[in-house]
Image: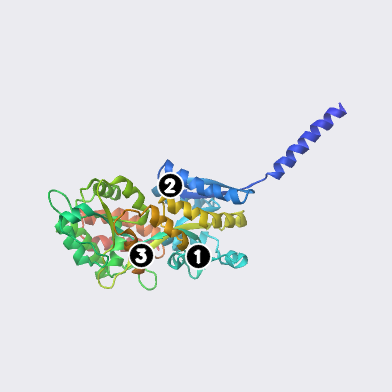
Amino acid sequence: MKKLAGIVAGLMLGSTLATGAFAQTVVTWQMWAGNEEDVAGWQEIADLVNKQYPDIKVELQTAPWGDYWTKLAAQAAAGQMTDIFSLQSLRTPNFHQLMEPLGPYIERDGFLIEQFIPSIIDGMSWEGNLYGLPFDLGTPLVFYNKDRFDAAGLTPTNEWTMEEFHAAAKALTTDGKFGVGVTPGMFAAWVAASGADYVAADGSYQLTDPAVVAALEDLVNMVSVDKVAPPVASASADEVNAGRFDSGDTAMQLDGPWAMINKKNTVKFTLGVLPMPLANGGLSPNSGAGFGIWSGSQHKDEAWKAVQVITGPEALAILAKSGRALVAREAEQAYWFDFAAKDVNGAQSAIEYSMGKSKPFPTGANFNILEGLFNQYLPLAFSGAETPANTLATIQDLVEQAM
């Protein structure tokens, strides 16, 4: 009996040792993903961590884009966030207080932060502190139907103005088809490109500034006055707009580099890309996204190791080659141009020109609230139910109440 007990004890000890030998720290990571292909792509990136650090396992959690931000806010309120969470650069002012400053880790490990594009490092920073390592960046672009441009006798150029953009939209509006599709989601970028600024120097919002109002009027007039753009559906305007462009019903669509691979694989016409048109010294806003560490994490060192891997050269090469991102590491961007942008007319020159004529996306405190108000109230202006001036005055009042 004693012999049997000894064997059992030995087996139990052996099991404990085996478990200890393969003990892993589980690091949770939350990321947005639109479909199963997206989830699989991010899982491949997550698996790189365990490949490099066998004692760390990254548990990936995903949610669709819209649900992601709702879920993130709920987790923040409950104090139950994942160790790593994904963040747009323009939302850094709203979430930085929940994130671990990365400066001490970078200094301690001699991490080569200069391998990233400087503008997106600035975007992931707040008040001199870096809160996330970026994986992508980009500016809004004008995707265009080159076949329709050729038929209209239009020669695209990177250095076009808003006046030339409007002229092109009118020339392309023919035979029941429109020159461009517009949505409320274009507003923030259009303001920056027009030379206006809805964020004041002190970080407050100035939505009733005459130049900001004029930018919204310009967008609205494309629908209601010039009729070069189809009516705007208030609910799923961006999806409807993308579908119209893909089918050839509109000749131009504003979107980002992240849309390149889907456009290229979907449209049946020759796809081209141009920078945003500019006016009055305006610049195209650049933004991106990255990964930060929750300040309440119990596994900060492991999370820091994981963040370095999922933004490392191998991970960003995978993202670039798949066309999923114009990546934030300069050395790996060539993969994206060679794959995602291949055979897209003018893509590389347009993006390089646009990045050279860009500034960080305008944002301030409570931008997440402001964006929600844009989504809720701007459709009223596009539908004609309210004037652009009154719409922006309403949003200004509401965002001030939330401050």
How many marks do you count on the picture?
Answer: 3
The local crowd at label 3, few if under 14, some if 14 to 19, many if 20 or more residues have their Cα within 10 Å, is some
Q: According to the image, label 1 marks what residue? A: 115
Q: Give 207 or 161, whichever is nearer the viewer.
A: 161
Q: Position of residue 252 (x, y in %)?
A: 24, 55
* Residue at 47%, 50% in the rendered image: 31
Local secondary structure at mark 2: loop
The local crowd at label 1, few if under 14, some if 14 to 19, many if 20 or more residues have their Cα within 10 Å, is some
Q: How is the image coloured?
A: rainbow
How much space separates mark 2 and mark 1, taking CA atoms?
A: 26 Å
Indicate whether 319 appears above or below 157.
above
Residue type highlighted by circle 2: Ala
Mark drawn on residue 267: none
Mark drawn on residue 352: 3
Q: Give 377 or 25, whichever is nearer the viewer.
A: 25
Q: Give 190 or 350, whichever is nearer the viewer.
A: 350
> Which of the two discs, 3 and 1, labels the residue nearer the N terminus?
1
The local crowd at label 2, few if under 14, some if 14 to 19, many if 20 or more residues have their Cα within 10 Å, is some
Q: Quadrant of the N terminus?
A: top right
Local secondary structure at mark 1: helix
* Dot 3 and dot 1 residues touching (CB under 8 Å): no
